[in-house]
Amino acid sequence: MNKFEDYLNKFTEADWLEFIESLVPTVHEVDRNALQIWFRFFPLELFRHLEAAEDRELAKSKLAMLGRYEIKDQVDTSHHFLYGHRFWKETKQAIEKEAETFTASEHGLTDEIKKIAITVAERRQVERTLTTAIAAVGLMTLVQSGLEAFKAATGQVEKPSGLLAKSPDKIVAARAEDDSQGIFGFLKTINKKYSIIYDETRARGKFPVISQEEIASASAKDQSQNWKEMDERCWEGVVPVECTSAACGTCWVGVIGGQDKLSPVSRRERRAMKTFGYNQPDDEKPFLRLACQAEALGNATIVIPPWNGVFGKKIYNNVEDVELEPVTTSAKNLRETIASATAAGKSDE
Ligand code: FES
């Protein structure tokens, strides 16, 4: 580890979250939720727990980890949903340079983040409000990937497309809009139709939802693509699901737009999120939700994390003993039973 990595590694996840919270007012609205969501998608203490495990595979299975949770495999991509993703190449370069020249920090981590953000903003001739989020994400990416893997990544990112090619203000405005209900839409009291946007880079990156329908149930109706081929956790729609009853943690999502247009968090969801280990803020309508519990009351823009697990008790020790069946049990077994019963039925015909 070099001096810069050593310095960054002094901080706990709680420290980072405190720094991030203090920086949020200085971040353009386009990336405010995205920044906070990214730090929840890649929890430092979970990373450290797995790093320290003697038998990593065993530790992973105890936490029912599924999907791609390691940053070192996605140094250039994990932050694809940030507006600042387009500044990644310069951010990565600025961090590498800081790692080479760092001797000691005179101030603190917030100032290190600001320093990177200023360098990138000057290089790209944009406001620092647009580079602060990616600078913070970049530094945590270094912590969790290590300098070698960080440097080995190409730093190349795709040109912004779809809604993300527009200006930050236009993106914020578009996220706040609801689908039109037609000329007589104001007369409708039920069956209003909205959209859940899960990929802002494509016009087709969304699925319809009926007012008061849960996000996961709407996602399951969208059979437009072979979702399972893209992510083995997606056996219904684009949102990974298992139990659909707040009992497995598979369907967690970040909400980057329209969080106020989702139903309030129920006690059941609140408790389950703690058990899973997902750091959901205490707000009535927070930016981290279970898609099988959150009902849509308008358009919302979500981000689907590439993994899920159940680690609240083990990592944060903030939950009582629970009798929770993780993803590897109930719903999956049920599906397998149905699949084998169907196959047996066919061969009998
Ligand atoms: S699908 Fe299991 S918690 Fe939502």
Image (cartoon, rainbow, N blue to C red):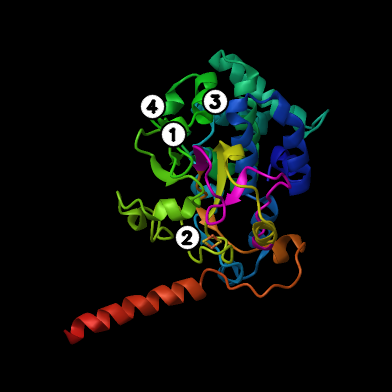
What percent of the width, then of the height, locates residue 7?
A: 76, 40
Q: Residue furthest bottom?
A: 348
Q: Where is residue 122, by image quadrant?
A: top right
Q: Nearer the viewer, mark 1 or mark 4?
A: 4
Q: Residue furthest top?
A: 125
Range of magenta residues: 275-302
Kindly state the secondary structure of the residue where label 2 is placed: loop
Dominant SS of magenta comes to loop
Say whether residue 163 is left or right of residue 134.
left
Residue at the disc numbered 1? 200
Question: Badge 2: few (under 14), some or many (20 or more) residues near its Cα, within 10 Å?
Answer: many
User: Which residue, given by chain and number where applicable, does mark 3 sit on?
Assistant: 172
Q: Residues within 10 Å of mark 1 (few under 14, many from 20)?
A: many
Q: Which residue is mark 4?
A: 183
What amino acid is labelled 2 in the image? Val
Q: Nearer the viewer, residue 182 or 300?
A: 182
Measuring from the top left, give residue 261's x and y in whole percent: 57, 39
User: In the image, what residue type sits under mark 1?
Assistant: Glu
Asked if the residue under mark 2 is in contact with the one under mark 1, i.e. CB atoms within 8 Å, the reply is no
Q: Earlier in the sequence, mark 3 or mark 2?
A: 3
> Is residue 318 placed above or below 114 in the rendered structure?
below
Asked if marks 1 and 4 touch (Cβ < 8 Å), the reply is no
For the question of whether residue 233 can be seen, the reply is yes
